[in-house]
């Protein structure tokens, strides 16, 4: 009790102590995580021209885009698409606000009317757009489907954004004209020509080995041209891949198993009775292949021609008698044995016409289809009865009843096409029937009324049954691959990565310049986890980690971390070295040349005087030398007979002399040329305006920090 009284007496003191402790804990955490004091909220994916894109909003749009793009698109592809859309929207909205342009309610209705003018659900009985139906549709969505209503709102926003973008671009284009003066200049740039003589002292005349380019030269060049050599943060890695692939032993085991089905078996390896009938003696081939042998390729009853068989074994299988078996043979990623079940003569092509009667639930059935399967069958049978007595009505019925729009314009006809082009039931009827046969055939698309109009080139076809086993690694092989990968990971972490790999004959693959939002690693495909690991805050050069990949493992090592800023001398060398070397060669050539005429220069440099006629400024190309804008520009600054000084070109140092000037033909009116200039400006707006606005925008990309990628 005495202790409690002392605590009560000093309660204010204790509260102050606890408060100070908590405050120091918070401060320590803040200083440990300086980003908490300086960076934007982790909820902001990006800030574009002062406007924030929140993580929640961004991910909602990613989810909607993923549904739209389907399972074939990777998460990163979807996110990048949404990112591009959001950036464009934000960049353009800045322009719309500055100009005060917007889409008002009345204009929005007109835009929707135009966009939905052909949508059946918004048309009245006269086939005209009905705004009341649109209002009813939107109200129904709002009441019954929050997700659907959200999609509709996004659709309206997209329609509005497209309209604003079109208006903005049209406004910019309207302000661009081609004046007569510009038309005249355009005409002269193309029409003014000069004939010249020139000497080229090629840079290749000086060996690279005698031109020294130091690291300081490259560094100075980078500093003088910073804009061209700014780079994002990147990482370099190297990796060894361990693939789970079937060994020779695994393949032999698969072939041994398949031979069991060829030869049959009474007892298994343990002596237990386990009868397997030989494939050649089987009567119910489909059940044997699919159930007893559990083939990785299911039985297909369709007949095939020789051309459809694997090239390497086509002759061997095609020439078998009924009941005979061939194999095991390797086909792509499987071992197979094949049995010829039946042989018959089948046309290699057929010509038919048909009427398709769909029903609710049939594949590709349009929304307006109202007939049930039973009703559709009654319709098809009724039409068949009429056609059997009067086939001339076929084109009329096609137009009135058939839902196959691909053939309606051709009176329901599919001209000559090869065997196995159509779905199974359709194919069997047209190739196994006779010319003139007419009947109703059901497929996944509905009921077809089919008439066989022609068949050509009856050829031997075979029905084959195949037992297949995919070539896959055994459990023992997979275990060995895992052990090898684990041992390499451990040993490489203790010693030199390259040395351990070389000692075990493993291939080391370097990958340089990985960006923070990259998704693909060359050689192993989509490996976003490796990229994330390489950019983790606590990642250090030399770190090693194992990653699971489809069919194996990758042991990766972080080799280098390149921060955002100017490209390093090492990384820039490949690009900068030829430029500096060319400049130094030009200086050497200038220092050794004393000739004042092109003839003297040709003699001194042991080369020849060449001619280039009809040079113009529009296309600054010199015959025999290629594109040389500086040299062509210098030529148009000379008078007839005048010789230039030395000119540093793209491929060498030049001296040029104008032999003849050919002025452009004067025109009475330059409007046509002015129109071309205007069209060129308009095309430039379409192709380059947005990119220019984007480059000028203030974009802060926090996708990596907010971990949405």
Image (cartoon, grey):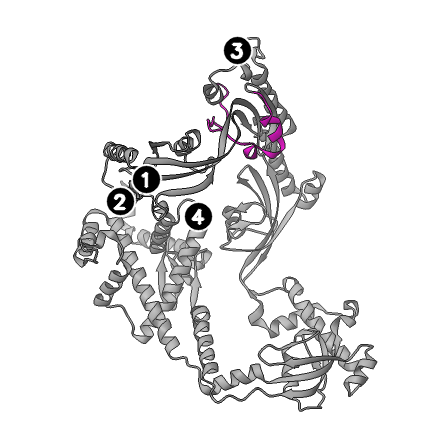
Q: In the rendered view of the protein, which quadrant contains the N terminus?
A: top left
Question: What element does badge 4 sit on?
Answer: loop
Q: What is the number of the mark on residue 355? A: 1
Closer to the eye: label 3 or 1: 1
Residue in the image at 62% along x and 70% along y: 222
Q: Which residue is mark 3?
A: 274
Q: CA distance from mark 1 to mark 4?
A: 37 Å
Q: Which residues are magenta?
A: 292-321
Relative vertical location of residue 630 with respect to residue 390 in this rendering, above or below: below
Distance from label 3 to label 4 (Cα)? 47 Å
What residue did someone put label 2 on?
A: 400
Q: Nearer the viewer, residue 189 or 560?
A: 189
Label 3: few (<14), some (14–19) or many (≥20) C-alpha neighbours in 10 Å: few
Disc 3 vs disc 2: Cβ atoms closer than 8 Å?
no
> How many neighbours does mark 2 have within 10 angstroms: few (below 14), some (14-19), or many (20 or more)?
few
Quote the CA–CA distance across marks 2 and 4. 40 Å
Q: Is residue 267 magenta?
A: no
């Amino acid at each position: 009790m005495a202790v409690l009284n002392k605590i009560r007496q000093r309660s204010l003191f204790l509260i102050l102590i606890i408060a100070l402790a908590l405050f120091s804990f918070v401060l320590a955490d803040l200083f440990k995580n300086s980003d908490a004091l300086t960076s934007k909220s982790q909820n902001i994916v990006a800030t574009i021209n002062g406007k924030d894109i929140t993580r929640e909003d961004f991910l909602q749009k990613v989810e909607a885009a993923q549904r739209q793009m389907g399972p074939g698109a990777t998460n990163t592809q979807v996110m990048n698409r949404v990112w591009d859309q959001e950036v464009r929207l934000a960049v353009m909205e800045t322009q719309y606000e500055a100009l005060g342009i917007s889409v008002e309610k009345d204009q929005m209705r007109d835009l929707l009317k135009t966009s939905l003018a052909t949508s059946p659900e918004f048309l009245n009985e006269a086939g005209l757009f009905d705004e009341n139906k649109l209002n009813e549709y939107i109200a129904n969505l709002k009441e019954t489907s929050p997700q659907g209503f959200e999609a509709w709102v996004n659709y309206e926003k997209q329609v509005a954004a497209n309209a604003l973008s079109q208006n903005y671009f049209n406004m910019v284009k309207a302000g661009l004209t081609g004046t007569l003066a510009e038309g005249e200049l355009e005409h002269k740039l193309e029409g003014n020509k000069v004939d010249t003589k020139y000497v080229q002292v090629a840079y290749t005349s000086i060996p690279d080995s005698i031109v020294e380019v130091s690291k300081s030269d490259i560094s100075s060049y980078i500093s003088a041209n910073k804009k061209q050599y700014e780079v994002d943060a990147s990482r370099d890695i190297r990796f060894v891949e361990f693939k789970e692939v079937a060994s020779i032993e695994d393949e032999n085991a698969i072939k041994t198993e398949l031979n069991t089905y060829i030869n049959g078996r009474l007892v298994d390896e343990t002596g237990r009775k386990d009868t397997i009938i030989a494939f050649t003696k089987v009567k119910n081939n489909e059940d044997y292949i699919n159930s007893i042998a559990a083939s990785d390729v299911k039985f297909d009853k369709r007949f095939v021609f020789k051309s459809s068989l694997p090239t390497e074994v086509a002759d061997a299988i095609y020439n078998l008698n009924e009941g005979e078996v061939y194999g095991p043979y390797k086909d792509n990623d499987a071992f197979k044995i094949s049995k010829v079940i039946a042989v018959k003569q089948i046309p290699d092509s057929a010509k038919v016409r048909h009427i398709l009667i769909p029903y609710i639930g049939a594949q590709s059935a349009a929304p307006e289809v109202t007939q049930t399967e039973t009703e559709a069958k009654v319709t098809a049978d009724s039409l068949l009865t009429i056609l059997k007595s009067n086939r001339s009505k076929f084109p009329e019925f096609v137009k009135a009843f058939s839902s196959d729009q691909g053939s309606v314009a051709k009176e329901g006809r599919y001209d000559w096409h090869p065997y196995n082009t159509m779905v199974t039931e359709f194919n069997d009827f047209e190739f196994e029937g006779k010319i003139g046969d007419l009947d109703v055939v059901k497929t996944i698309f509905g009921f077809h009324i089919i008439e066989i109009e022609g068949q050509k080139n009856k050829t031997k076809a075979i029905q084959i049954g195949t037992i297949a086993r995919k070539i896959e690694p055994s459990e023992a092989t997979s275990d060995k691959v895992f052990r090898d990968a684990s041992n390499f990971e451990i040993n490489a972490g203790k010693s030199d990565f390259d040395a351990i790999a070389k000692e075990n004959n493993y291939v080391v693959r370097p990958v340089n310049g990985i960006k923070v939002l990259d998704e693909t690693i060359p050689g192993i495909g989509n490996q976003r986890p490796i990229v994330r690991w390489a950019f983790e805050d606590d990642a250090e050069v030399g770190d090693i980690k194992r990653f699971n990949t489809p069919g194996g493992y990758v042991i990766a090592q972080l080799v280098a971390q390149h921060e955002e800023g100017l490209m390093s001398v090492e990384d820039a060398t490949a690009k900068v070295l030829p430029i500096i070397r060319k400049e130094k060669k030009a200086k050497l050539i200038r220092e050794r040349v004393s000739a004042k005429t092109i003839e003297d220069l040709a003699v001194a440099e042991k080369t020849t005087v060449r001619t280039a006629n009809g040079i113009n400024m529009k296309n600054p190309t010199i015959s025999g030398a290629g594109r040389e804008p500086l040299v062509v520009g210098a030529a148009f600054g000379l008078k007839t007979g005048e010789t230039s000084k030395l000119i540093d070109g793209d491929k060498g140092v030049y001296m040029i002399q104008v032999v003849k000037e050919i002025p452009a033909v004067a025109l009475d009116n330059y409007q046509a040329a002015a129109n071309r200039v205007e069209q060129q400006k308009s095309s430039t707006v379409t192709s380059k305006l947005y990119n220019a606005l984007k480059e000028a925008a203030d974009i802060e990309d926090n996708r990596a920090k907010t971990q949405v990628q």
